[in-house]
Image (spheres, rainbow, N blue to C red):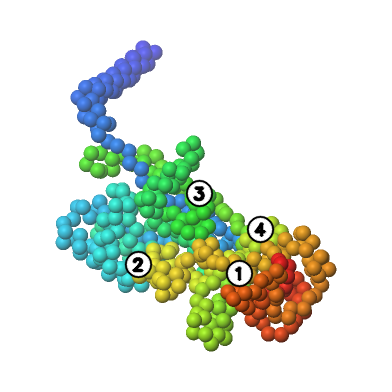
Amino acid sequence: MAIDDDRTKLRLRIFAFVALILFGALVARLWFLQGIEHEVLSDEALTNVLEPVYTEAPRGRILDRNGRVLVDNKVVQVVTLDRRMLETLDEEETFDVLQNLALTISRSGRPTKVSTISAEIADPRYGPFDRIPIAVDVNSKLMVYLGERPDQFPGVRVEQRTIRIHPYGSLAAHLLGYVGPVTRAEQEQANANLDPEAEDDKTYQLNSQIGKTGIERIFERELRGVPGVRWLEVNNLGEVIREHSSSVPRRGNDVWLTIDIDLQARAEEQLASGLARTRAESDDPDVLAPAGSVVAIDPRNGDVLAMASYPTYDPSQFANGISTEEFELLTSEDNYWPILNRAIQGSYAPGSTWKLVTSVAAVQHGVLNELYGGSDEFIIDVGSYIYPNCETGTDLEGTCVFESPFVGSRHVDLADALTVSSDVYFYRVGG
């Protein structure tokens, strides 16, 4: 028993000795941090800053009235560059890297110039910690090739990002619109219009995308997602010390339209063929018929079912970035401004479209019953109309009679009058 007691006491002494050593080390470390390194840590805390790095969120989809997706997102491979890695190289080494990168991307089927990459690197839209996109939607072979050669391409990495795609091609291009890099003026205006009390931070950075035209622009607030953000602690040398927190991007909301894509396709087809037929059938060299528009509206509720404009363009041109030359073709007078939505951006005399307004007013106020006995009763359009209470004179000779361009007589009711655009019928209704 005495031997066991001695062993127990020995173990306790050893345990106490070890605990004393550990406690002493802890006290010494605490004294070191509080005393010797206090000023160093304080200076570090004051000089280190948190830098946000944003990741664009996928935008919401755009759908037609039947739920068919008109604009969607596609995940693509993007070659990106961390320009901080180039700062460790001299001018000649930097040029060699960029030249090799441009040549490699060009060989993959995406012609790229060194000057283009240099311009992207110098673009002030990108912050010091943003990865700069060099080539969008590259193939997997290029991704593997670059990934296997980090020494040849310092700072280069292939990442996944989303771009806009249009499953129906150029259909409804003017109506849907396109997205592009935000300008400084657009950024300031968009951020000023954000709700400061909103839970979701949709703040625009200079490298953000924004709707430029059409639905993409009108419903920008709904379509834009919530960007992801990584908070990096950076010292006074611009070096990343650690990553504090991050949030993943959240996709924007979907937008449903009243458009019927089948009717839209029919409208665009008939518009293009109708203009071509007009040009072919006319002997007048001044009849060019180069452009036009069509809008189909449900008279019961005002829903826009189709909106077509000609000439048109392919919005997918903007997905990977459009060149200056390509954009100039879309805004060229010689090409009749394909990017212009003539349905809403042009000013034109209403012409015979006003006959619809006259028809509705005449039906509602019973004018057709008084004149013709009803909207389904026929009258004879003889091709001319004499204005009532018209006084002829030297200066008004011949102006009391309207002569229709159509030759001969015909029987028309309201439906026929709208179909053939009978001026005589509506002169009598309005007169």
- Identified by mark 1, the residue type is Gly
Tell me if residue 180 can be seen: yes
- Identified by mark 3, the residue type is Arg
Q: Are marks 3 and 4 in contact (CB under 8 Å)?
A: no
Name the residue: 50% across, 49% down: 221
Q: In this view, does 364 lie to the left or right of 87?
A: right
Q: Quadrant of the N terminus?
A: top left
Residue 268 position, x and y percent, is: 57, 72
Name the residue: 80% across, 75% down: 378
Q: Earlier in the sequence, mark 1 or mark 2?
A: 2
Can you identify the residue that label 4 sits on? 302
Can you identify the residue that label 3 sits on? 221
Q: Give me the disc on residue 351.
A: 1
Name the residue: 19% across, 24% down: 36
Residue 427 position, x and y percent, is: 70, 70
Q: What element carries label 3?
A: helix
Residue 279 position, x and y percent, is: 53, 82
Q: Which of 149 and 96 is in front in this view?
A: 96
**Which residue is farthest right?**
373
Can you identify the residue that label 2 sits on? 324
How far, Cα to Cα, is label 3 from label 1?
37 Å
Q: Quadrant of the C terminus?
A: bottom right
Q: Is residue 424 left or right of residue 222?
A: right
Q: In the rendered view, would you say 315 is above or below 399?
A: above
How far, Cα to Cα, is label 3 from label 2?
28 Å
Q: Which of marks 4 and 2 is nearer the N terminus?
A: 4
